[in-house]
Amino acid sequence: MNFHTAERKRAKLKMGLQGPSGSGKTMSALLIAFGINNNWEKIAVIDTENGSANLYAHLGPFKVLDIQSPYTPEVYMKAINFCESQSIEVVIIDSISHEWDGSGGVLDMHGSMAGNSFTNWAKLTPRHNTLIQVILQSPCHIITTIRTKQDYVLVEKNGKQVPEKVGLKSIQRDGLEYDLTLVFDLDIKNNATASKDRTGLFFGKPEIKVSILTGQMLRDWCNSGSEISMNEISSRIGSCKSIAELLQLYSLYPEYKTSLQPEYEKRKRELILTPDSKPQLINSSNFNSNGEYNH
């Protein structure tokens, strides 16, 4: 039995993207995946959504593995193991909700089992838990998309118990988010906020539009045992597609703010300058106490 010094170098990200239909879960997952490894051919989507991943083929030549019902935990595990055997670096499970509440999923199996409900759960829970462990122990980065539905609670009104809406609830077994490194909640306008964040990059901060830069930030966090070079940051400045992306990059690497300020200024002018506008410099005076950009 020996100690080892704690380090995060070469960690593998396990994250969730949850939201209603149309919130951009699949697209966001693909952008993050490409930001993490910069190689579409090393990205695979385990698709339970009737081939919906193919709608994003214009992004790049990522791999798609279609799986059909019954959506048992074992089907998901087999798909993950196949991706690993093919040297895939980032696996997107789109979506993991089917394993819980899909045809042949855990709830479906439980509902069809005869006998004592408690005893039946004792048979199914280990199968579900094994899938979660396969995800957590995978040598791949894994991004899971999670469907949500309207949640209700019973409240008393006029002496009667009536249902009342209390927000959205993920369609998966309670507690999944505790096992993940990061969970983004996406709204119908594709805005993302972190409801669970062990990275410290996003929690308690304003909502963002998920982009390739988001994946790059997460890759840097996973590899934070290795110092990122100023040349790489410089290259990313030129690839920023919006002021929001530029601000994320500017805030993430404060050690390079002074050295690269001219490049930040140049890129910002390219993004916002119009014929009759004046360029604004990116420096500390452009930001408020919350780190938000003052336009």
Image (spheres, rainbow, N blue to C red):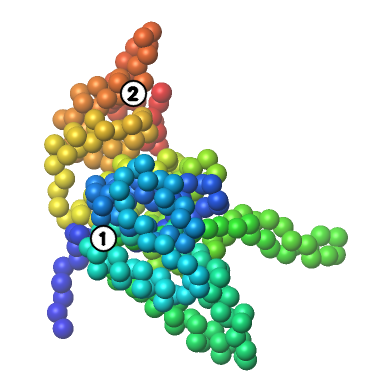
Q: Tell me if residue 215 can be seen.
A: no
The residue that disc 2 covers is: 271
- The amino acid on which the numbered mark 2 sits, given as a three-letter code, is Leu
Q: Nearer the viewer, residue 287 or 77?
A: 77
The residue that disc 1 covers is: 88
- The amino acid on which the numbered mark 1 sits, given as a three-letter code, is Ile
Residue 34: image x %, image y %? 29, 48
Q: Tell me if residue 6 can be seen.
A: yes
- Residue placed farthest to the right in the image? 158
Q: CA distance from mark 2 to mark 1?
A: 35 Å
Q: Is 84 situated above or below 240?
A: below
Which of the image's four quarters has the C terminus? top left
Q: For numbered disc 1, what is the local secondary structure? A: loop
- Residue depicted at x 43% and y 60%: 47
Dots 2, 1 in contact, CB < 8 A: no
Q: Is 232 situated above or below 127?
A: above
Residue 24: image x %, image y %? 47, 46
Residue 45: image x %, image y %? 37, 57
220 lies left or right of 103? left
- Residue depicted at x 62% and y 89%: 114
- Residue depicted at x 37% and y 61%: 65
- Residue 136 lies in quadrant: bottom left
Q: For numbered disc 2, what is the local secondary structure? A: helix
Q: Nearer the viewer, residue 245 or 239?
A: 239
